[in-house]
Each structure stands twice: as structure tokens, then as C-alpha cells.
Image (spheres, coloured by chain):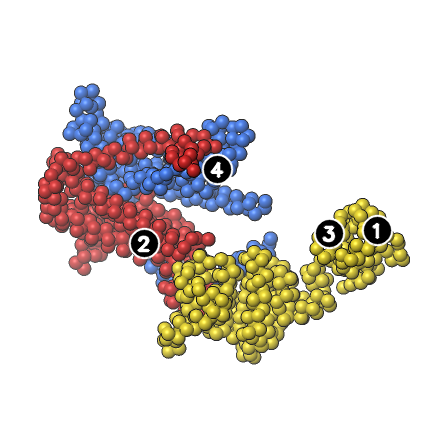
Chain colours: A red, B blue, C yellow
Amino acid sequence: MGFNQGNILRNKPHVLPGFRLSLGFTLFYLCLIVLIPLSAVFLRTTELTLSEFWAVVTTPRLLASYRLTFGASLIAALINLVFGFLTAWVLVRYQFVGKKILDALVDLPFALPTAVAGISLTAIYASNGWIGQWLEPHGIKVAFTPLGVVVALTFIGLPFVVRTVQPVLEDFSAEAEEAAASLGANRWQTFYKVILPAVWPALLTGFSLAFARAIGEYGSVIFIAGNMPMVSEITPLMIITKLEQYDYAGATAIAVVMLVISFILLLTINLLQWWSAHRHGSQP
Amino acid sequence: MHATQSQQYAAKIASRRATSEPVWVRYGLITLTVAFLTLFLLVPLAAVFTEALRKGWSVYIAAIFEADALSAMWLTLIAAAIAVPLNLVFGVAAAWAIAKFDFKGKHFLITLIDLPFAVSPVIAGLIYVLMFGLQGWFGEWLIDHDIKVIFAVPGIVLATIFVTFPFVARELIPLMQAQGKEEEEAALVLGASGLKMLWHVTLPNVKWGLIYGVILTNARAMGEFGAVSVVSGHIRGLTNTMPLHVEILYNEYNYAAAFAVASLLTLLALVTLVLKTYVEWQAARSAVRNEEGVIAS
Amino acid sequence: MSISIQHINKGFGQFSALRDINLQVPSGELVALLGPSGCGKTTLLRIIAGLESPDSGQVLFDGVDTTHRDVRERQVGFVFQHYALFRHMTVFENVAFGLRVRPKATRPSDAEIKKRVHELLSLVQLDWLADRYPPQLSGGQRQRIALARALAVEPKVLLLDEPFGALDAKVRKDLRRWLRRLHDELHVTSVFVTHDQEEALEVADTIVVMNHGQVEQVGTPQAVYDQPATSFVYEFLGNVNAFETPQGKGFVRPYEIVVSRSPSTDSIAGQLTYVHSVGSLVRLEIKRADNAQYVDVELGREVFNQSQFAQGEQVFITPNRIRVF
């Protein structure tokens, strides 16, 4: 028994070549580009005492930025949850003119540089913009307000829910829907008892991805936000502000807060995926 | 064959009829979706070009061929030209190790590779400032040897590599896992060397996934703003990439010029989408071909 | 409930799936729609269910026209080829689904639903699986759960699409007998689709043989096997040899041929190329001397043992029953 245990690399001969080389290079590059620089953030915070750290990351201006960043990200992700599902549904189920083009355009927020998205949305929603000029008389200001932040974050999060839900809807068997109908379920019952539970894990994943992306977003937001302290400053901007003041410790402390939250989100996404894959037992 | 195909097609149509929504619901949903996508995708797209041409073609052309704009384009191309091949090599190596071999901690490694997706671009820039900036770990050493990383091209390249880090690997890992390792083993049995096997068997099998990953990497590399913004120092003509150049022009209230340069980036995004759609189409086609091959055999 | 199908036509684009189908299914019978893939049998089943509507013609349940009635109101139980169990629901919830989606006025109480579901699960002998999810079940178990779910709505008609198609040979055989017994117990009018002649012959009261969107023959298993109405039915049900006769093409079953070492008046000379001797039947493969075609012959083991034909031997075959259509 004993000789089977121990170093897996040594005792299990690989037929294919290049395992050590490829894994070695992968780990080396990963450490060099990602792990060592990221660890710098955590190590640099240790220069602050805990109370100093707490004081830096809980100033009123920062607290306001957390509220805006997380609040706007949550709202944007919820909008994308609803409209992303709707878009995926319509693109999978219905035929209409221009569908293929719209389908391809859904990825625009991935492909368009965020700065371009930012200035374009600002131009549209400014008081003299295409849409802004119609909203302003009704007392709705979008550009340079928190509402503008929501608009920008909705834009950049748009593809996530669509692209996670679309393949699930495509693979969904028509038989299951027919079975529900033959058992007497009406269309609405079939939808929320049969279809929705099946796409729910994908919806959650897409929502989390859109939310996580929105929290870290910078380029598209700073143009439309107006960046007024206490009102429309997002947390990533606070890092930049600290850096411009050469307050490295402050910038690092905020970065740690954001990183921890992002990692928790990443973990949640992975857990959700694991849970949805294992809840119903082994997949056939 | 004809009969079964028509039957499958028939089943598809019929199932839709027995289990589809009333016409008014269908058209309502389509209208709502098209309105949403128009508002969030088409209008911003149209606005870029409208604003860019607001002051006419001559202003547009002048903004694009201005010296600082040209040097920004050059820097953007350089950053992409370095970041894309490096991440490509990394992606192939990582996918090879992960997809073809079993080892402990594989899932943890995949999570680590995905890490840059979860990090705000601003933090991506910050980490290199903490490493190579004036107060950074290597700051003094770099000054002593007269090497500039932050507020210089190397920093921009590093930040670009970071934000595009996972793209190729992410595309290749599932594809190469699905391919299995029989074909590679067959190549070895037939006497191919490791490199020959990689070049003639492995890479052709994942060709479309590879190209897909490169397209995404390139688009993100050329368009990255937040991370590059932190490390660039915004020195006109020297450390400005195209997105940063857009920002400077915009903040100087030079809107027409800002949108002119932005329109080039937008065209790049549209080309990316076209290529992406084409690659997806090709990949689907080759998948269908493989499937038919399996059935035929 | 009886089903009457009158002049049903159905096409998909250029392809005509069903042509003028007329069929009577008496109440309480178990009917098999048998035919090769693409013959229209599944389309016909789906039209009976209301999952598809015919281009013309009528479907009558107990004499009442239901052609345009929605699938939800037809009270049919449909068992899908791949079962279509709801994978995110437990076995219990799957079976309870049809009761839970009823309008409030006719929906049974939770206690009644529980009782009814457990009755059904006992009926299909899978009560112990109530809390499992479909992916955790074997193919045969899924099949029986799908049946229990279909029966939960107390259907007047039970429709099964290739009910055993996705199962391996052993399970298939067990389930076949089980379905037969279940039908004898419940006596609900049932129609199932199959491409497997053995399955149809063993399970059904009546077999409807279909080909190219048309009904070739309707009859009891014995009738369609012994008195096939067309050459298609003859060929489709069992192995067959073709002979040229003065009246045209004639068909002979492998067990309707006499083999001997000496020629007689109508015998055909040939060479015994292969002897397959396993089980109670011995199968011979004989290459005809006149046109080099192969003829399959089946002999009982005793008959074979008496003559002990050897591979390569010269033999003479005489068909003792030729059917010409």
C-alpha cells in the first residue's frame, strides 16, 4: 500500500510529455503577474495598525462611496437580472428581423473600451443630450448623479446574465414543457414551476458576475458620475484620489476592503455553481 | 435521413406551437427587449459616431492624425502586441497542464487563474505601483539602476497583461478537457515529438477556441482604461494609450476630438464583435462536423 | 374511452408525415403504433395528445370531436421518449405536479395529494424513491416514475412514445411484461409507439403497422404476423427470404423452408456456407447456385440433428409456403 501514497508527481507516470514544463511555467507566470503583486496589497496594509486601518476605511466620505458603489451595483445587477433574462428568452425563443445583429451586439459592453462607453453615455444623458433633454423637464437628472452611475453599471453588466442564461434556455428540453402542458399546467405555471427553476442557477451566476464586475468598474462610471464627494464618488475613484495624494497606505487599505469583498463574491459564485451542479445528484 | 430530419424539424415546430405564448405576449416581450437593447446598446453606439462627426470630417481627420493621438495609437498597439502573445503562451501552457494531467489543487489553480477577473482594474494598477513605484518594494533599486516601470511603458504593459490574464486559458481549458488525450497519445505512439504533437494535433483541435481567446484578449488589451490609468502618469505623447488620450481630450472639453478617437476604438469593438461571431459560427460548424463523424463511424 | 381518428393529414413543409389516417381504438385496449423511424407514428401520437394539430381530419374521444381542444384539457397522460422528468423536483413532486397545477376549485388538499402520490408510487413499486431526484434514478426507474406522473391526472387515455426505447435489453423485457400487467389492472385506453416488432407483438392487443405516413394493416399480433396484408408488413415483422415466382416476388419465412441432400421437383440447389448452431434453433446460410443470393433457413434442433448438415455441403431447398403480394 505504502508505495502508492506520497508524491503524486513521482509515482504516477505521465504518458504525455511536458507536464512539469507547462505546470512550472504556469505557476511561475501566475506568481509573477498575479500572486506576488496582489500579495503586495495585503502586506502593505500591515504597515498600518488595526485602528489606523479602521479609521482610514471608515471615513464618512468613504462610507458614502461604499453605499453608492454597492447600492448602484446591486440595482444595476437587478436590472440586468430582469432584462438579461428577458433578452435571453426572446433571443432563444422568438424569431424577428434583426435578431442575429442584436444577439451579436449583446457583447458590445465586453468589447467597447469602458472610457468610450463612459463619454458616450454622458453625452446621451447630459441635459442637452438625446435622452437627457427629454428627462430633464420632468425633473429627472441622470448625468452627474447616482442615477448616472446605475446607467453606466447597467451597461457594462448587460452581457453577463444574457450569456449565462442563453445556453441553459437553448438546452432546455421541449419535452419537459410539453410534459407540464399535458399534465394540465397553464403557460404561467409551466414558466415558474418548470422553466424558471431550471434556469435559476444560471440566473444567479449571471447576477453575481454582473454585480462583481460593477463593484470594480471605473472607466465607464467616472465620466457620468460627476464625482461629487459624499454624493457620486465610487470607491475605485477613492483609491485613485488617495494615490494622487501619494497616500499609498490609504489607497492600499481601501483596495484591501474591495479585494476581500470581491473574493467573497467569487467564492459565493463558485459555491453557487457547485451547489447547482450537485443539488440534484449526479448528472446523467 | 431526410425523413428523420424533417421529423426532428417537425417536432421542434410542433412543440413550440403546443407550448408557446399568446401572440400578444410574444410581441410585447420582443418589443420590450428591442427597446431595452436599443436604449443601452444602439443609442450609445450611434452617439459616439454622431458626436465624433459633429464638427465635420476635417476636425475628425485632424483629431485622428494629430501627433499625440498617433503616439497614443502606437503605444496601444505595442502594449497589445506584447500582452497578447505572452498571455497566449501562458494560456496554452496552463490549459495543457490542467486539461491533460491530474494533480492535486487543480481546481484551486483554476480559481487563481480567474482571479484577475474579480479584481477591480484600479487595484490591478495599484498593485504594480506598490511593487515598482517610488515607495514600492523595488522602487529604490529601480531608481538606482535608472529603470522606469511606473509612469512608463513597462508599467502599462504589465497592467495590460494583468487585466487580460485569464482570457485565453479560460477558453482553452474546457475545450482541451473535452478533447481528451487519446489523439495526443496516438501521435506519440506514431513517433511524434512533443512539439510536433502540440503543433499538429493539440493546437489544430482547439484552433477556434484559441482564436476566440486571442480576439477577446486583444479587445480588452487595447481598450483597458482603469488599470492603465493608474500606472501611466498621463504624459502626453509618451505614456498615453488611446483610451487615456480620449479621457484627456474629454476633460479639456475637446469633445469632437475625444469622440473622434473614441470612434476608432468603437470600430475596433465592432470588428471584434464581427470576428467573434464569425469564430463562434466556425466553431459550431466544426463541432457539428465532428458529431456527424462520430455518428457515421 | 374510445379514440376515433378520421381522415387525418399532416405535413411539414414539403414532407407529408401522415396521409389520410383512419383508426379506431376501442375503449380499454392497448394499441401499438409500429413502423420504421420516419413513418409518422410519433406524429400521430402527438396529434392524439394535442401536442400537435393536424392539417385536416378529426380526432374523436368517445365520439366527441376534440381536434381543437388544448392539450391541457384533453386529460391524456403522455409518457415521453426521454421521460421529461422535471430534474429540479423530487420524484414525489414530479408525480404531484399534475395535481398541484389544478385550479384552486378542483385542486385536492395537500393530504389528499400525498395519499394519491404514494398510491401511484406503490403502483409502480417505487414508493421508496419518493425523495430522490430524477438524475439519481436508473433508466427503468425513471420510466416508471414518468408513467406514475402521467397516471396522476387520472387520464382517460394513456399515450407512450417509444416507452422502452432508451433502456437496455434486459430492463426492456422486464418493463414490457410489467406494463402489460399494469394495463390489465387499470384498463385505461393506451396507445404506444414503437419501432421494435418484438415489443409490439408481445405487449399489444392490437397492432397498427405504419409506413410512409400511412396505415398498412391493423390487427391482433397473430393476425398481422400470420396474415400480413402487404409485403411491407411481411418484411417488417420478422426475417424473410425473397424468391422470384411466376406471379412476382414471393416471400418465405426462414422456418418455412425444407432442406435436403437430394433434389425434388421444385427444389433449388445451393451450397451451405454457414451453420449457426446455438440454442434451440439452428440457422443455416445457403448460397443459391442459380443466382448466388443467400437464403436464411431456420431448423429445429432435432431436425438438424437428424441430418447433420455440414458447412460447405451441397444441399437442396424447397419453400413449403410462399406468399406473393
Of tags 4 and 1, the one toward the viewer is 1
**Type of amino acid at the residue the image marks with label 4:** Lys
- In percent of the image, x 19 and y 44: which residue is there? A257
The percent position of residue B13, horizontal first and vertical second, equals 50, 60
Other-residue count near label 1 (Cα within 10 Å), few / some / many at <14 / 14–19 / ≥20: many
The residue tagged 2 is A204
Q: CA distance from mark 1 to mark 3?
A: 17 Å
Q: Mark 3 — on which chain does it sit?
A: C
Q: Position of residue B31 (x, y in %)?
A: 35, 59
Q: Depth check: B258 or B80 in front?
A: B80
* Residue found at x 54% / y 74%: C186
Calculate the distance from the C-alpha at mark 4 to the C-alpha at mark 3. Answer: 43 Å
Amino acid type, callout 3? Ser
**Residue tagged 1:** C315
Task: State the SS at label 2.
Answer: helix
Q: Is residue B202 above or below residue C293?
A: above
Residue B181 bears which disc, if any? 4
Asked if residue B36 can be seen in this view, the reply is no
Q: Are marks 3 and 2 in contact (CB under 8 Å)?
A: no
Name the front one of labels 4 and 3.
3
> What's the residue type where badge 2 is placed?
Leu
**Label 4 marks which chain's residue?**
B
Query: Which structural element holds mark 3?
Result: strand
Give me the residue at 47% from left, 28% from top.
Answer: B194
